[in-house]
Amino acid sequence: MATIQELQFFIRENINQAYPEPEAGAIAQLVLEHVLHKSRVQLSLQQQETVTQAQEEEVKQAVLRLQQQEPVQYVLGVAHFYGLELQVDERVLIPRPETEELVDRVIKQHKNREHLRILDICTGSGCIPLALAANLNTDSVVGLEVSTGALEVARANTAKLNLPVEWLEHDVFKPIPGIAPESLDIITSNPPYVREDEKKQMRENVLQFEPHLALFVPNADPLKYYKRIAAIGLELLKKGGKLYFEINEQYGAQVAKLLLEHGYSRAEVVQDLFGKDRMVEAVK
């Protein structure tokens, strides 16, 4: 029977072609935390403890998938996002840290308000509306998504977390049913924003495993989602309501300009922790 220490070494040794150090070490840690149901501290204090045959086998199966560069979140079926453990698989994008920054910004600006009504567009796994529902005082939170598969994942997350989010399977480019004009306080969106011609700069495991529908926009019209969602915001947001976008870092100024041209009273480009233009916030 292998010890925790031996299993950790086994993972790192066998995935370092796909994931060099220090990433291999971080992934080994995630796999062991998940399979052994232990915290980081427990793993470091119990290095000589032996694992069961079943646990060892589960780790070996995970390693086979990791060797194919499959993202560790898909291998384990979970991703951590703003204090929530979300179910994820190939039907949804893996939630990113920069999206947590967007959520954090919305929460800090609205934490003292009550009866908030929120719509998240292109919701994927539901990470944004679920985190907002968990941390704000809301009357209504809706996640809109065109992909049936993605919404199955989002619904599973609602059931798992028992949070009050409703899901709407709908194409954003068609009129949105069931939401009254000028009734929303907040609209958030992390829409597809990677241009087709940027594929060659992306990691192979993202291209191979994550859903292209949620990633890519045509080179000829990279702002198509922002234009459409800006129009939706004018229709559905209350006066003074706020729109928050995650953006392609190359388009901050253009998205802000587009919002002002649509008639928003203010639009601001916000940088992420790495100093990249990553969000645009606007006021109706």
Image (spheres, rainbow, N blue to C red):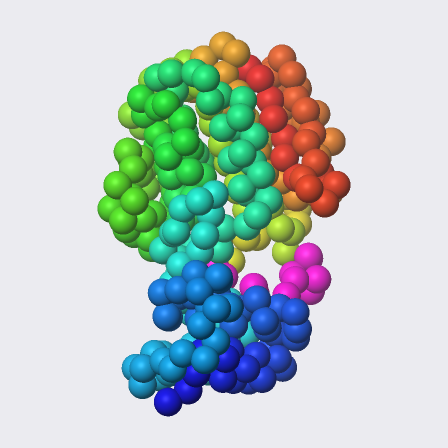
Work out whether residue 33 can be spotted.
Answer: yes
Q: Position of residue 188 (x, y in %)?
A: 49, 32
221 or 34, nearer to the observer: 34
Q: Is residue 212 left or right of residue 154?
A: right
Residue placed farthest to the top in the image?
239
The residue lying at 47 percent from left, 43 percent from top is 82
Q: In the rendered view of the protein, which quadrant contains the C terminus? A: top right
Residue 203: image quadrant is bottom right
Relative depth, front residue between 26 and 266: 26
Q: Position of residue 255 (x, y in %)?
A: 66, 31
> Which is the main secondary structure of the residues drawn in magenta?
helix
Is 206 contained in the magenta span?
yes
Q: Nearer the viewer, residue 284 or 4?
A: 4
Residue reaching furthest to the bottom: 1
Who's the residue at 35% across and 23% down the image?
A: 138
Give the residue drawn at x 38%, y 20%: 116
Up/down of 216 relative to 7, above or below: above
Residue 211: horizontal and vertical position, in percent?
Answer: 47, 59
The answer to whether residue 148 shows anywhere in this view is no
Q: Quadrant of residue 12?
A: bottom right
At a point 54% along the width and 22% down the height, the residue shown is: 109
* Residue 114 within the magenta-colored segment of the rendering: no
The magenta span reads: 197-211
Please identify the quadrant where the N terminus is shown: bottom left
Residue 272 horizontal/vertical position (percent): 67, 40
Above or below 264: residue 84? below
Determine which quarter of the picture holds residue 139: top left
